[in-house]
Image (spheres, helix red, strand yellow):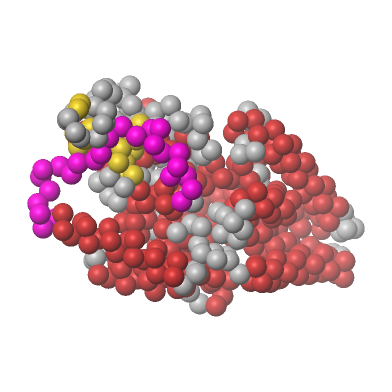
Amino acid sequence: MTPTTVQRKGAITTGTMGNKGFITETELKKHNGTNGSQSWIAIKNRVYDVSSFGEEHPGGTIIFTHAGKDATDVLSAFHPASVHKWLPRFYIGDLVKDSRVTPLDAQKEAEYRQDIIAMKSELMKARAFESSKLYYAFKIATNLAIFAAAVAVILMFNGIVGAVIGGVLMALFWQQSAFLAHDFLHHQVFTNRSYNNLAGLLFGNIWQGFSTSWWKTKHNHHHASTNVVHTQAGGDPDIMTMPFLLWSEKIIEGDAEDLKDLPKFMVRYQKFFYLPLNAAARISWLLQSILFQLEPVHKYVGGLPMKIAEISSMAVHYVSLVLITSLLKTTSSRIVFQLTCQSLGGIFLAVIFTVGHYAMEIFTSEVMSDTDFVRLQVRSTRNITPTVFNKWFSGGLAYQVEHHIWPTLPRHSLPLASKILKRFCSKHNIPYTVKGLIEGNLAVFKLLSQIGERF
């Protein structure tokens, strides 16, 4: 076959791929969507131009978090194998390793890649990706029992005591509902994605009060660029908590406007704001869910029917909450109930989320480009010591590292994945972090304190 040159702007060499060519890693990195460049991604050593795919992509602009990078592992983590049939129309050439890579490094990299594939193969062989419907039925039943207990306490005591205990139980019900919605919306339970999305409306919108479309938009970006400060599609939204909390000076590094407007008083004393802000977090998430309903229809996977379903199901949540609160006879007990369940509803979730990623490594986009998906997830994520209580209270996210590498893996399969991943990390000298729930939160508090002292 006669060698031909890639005709697309920016491709640099010739090859024997018909009308395609070869593209070096250096050239791939240049096409990261910034400064007017195109957005290229690499998957299994083949390069694709996805510059015009953002509006068509079901996940929207999240695809651009990996512009200029290898997206093999992140594609595998989030998508079924069937999506590969859509790739050929975006193909522009084959990826060529840079000449600076020594044969020894290439051999180590090849072994590393094979070990990543072997981990998933081991999980597949164990049928770990097949969910136990009985397990999830049990989780749903126990969560309904918590809800029933909350209502029963309110009816039995019907005063301040009932308001406090009922509020604690309601907050726990909301927290566990969020974890159920999380599992279903990651498509861990059913192979049919529509069934998972419908379950998400029940557990997320009705039981918990959060918009599933808002959550998926935010959460998928978090998974794709965990603890990354800036990408073409924006950084990890979970660490972009200014002006309230600053998790790393990398977030404001080199940004004159951010430095000028930096609320130094807030940053200096942020360790004292940490718990109150967590107590207010649920209200913030509820408001964001409501405001998301103003977004155009194309933001919803499912279009207009999903938007109508979202608004309707969230309305059911609020009507139900008003009815439950009205079971209390006095205004003071109703206020106490709302303060208790809303504040603890935020804290119960936040103490899990913060341990998972805060006070862990934070990456710039440049470092992310040189860090493969598995290393990035392990280095940016912390597990919680998997005691019986921690595994239940965290909704399975005691195994946060494993969840981030295989997000579609059902909760009950995460302990097996942990054994496999620990062995892999030990072999390749990748730090694997585990801390107790209290110890992890203390590490987060210490980080906030250290950053505050520098301002």
Task: Report x, y in % for residue 347.
Answer: 59, 58
Task: Report x, y in % for residue 296.
Answer: 63, 28
Which residue is depicted at the point 31% across and 47% down?
44
Q: Nearer the viewer, residue 220 or 340?
A: 220
* Left or right for 299, reference 274: right
Which residue is depicted at the point 76% across and 45% down?
313
Q: Can residue 438 be found in the magenta stretch?
A: no
- Reply above or below: 268 against 154: above
Q: List the single residue furthest toward the front.
A: 1
Q: How many marks?
A: 0
* Left or right for 374, reference 286: left
The residue stretch that appears in magenta:
81-105
- One can see residue 149 in this view: yes
- One can see residue 252 in this view: no
Q: Nearer the viewer, residue 321 or 35?
A: 35
- Reply above or below: 326 against 400: above
Task: Report x, y in % for residue 149.
Answer: 78, 69
The quarter of the rendered structure image containing the N terminus is top left
Which residue is depicted at the point 32% across and 72% down?
423
Q: Quadrant of residue 434?
A: bottom left
The quarter of the rendered structure image containing the C terminus is top left
Q: Can residue 82 be found in the magenta stretch?
A: yes
Q: List the single residue furthest toward the right.
A: 329
Which residue is depicted at the point 72% across and 36% down?
305
Task: Report x, y in % for residue 266.
Answer: 46, 42
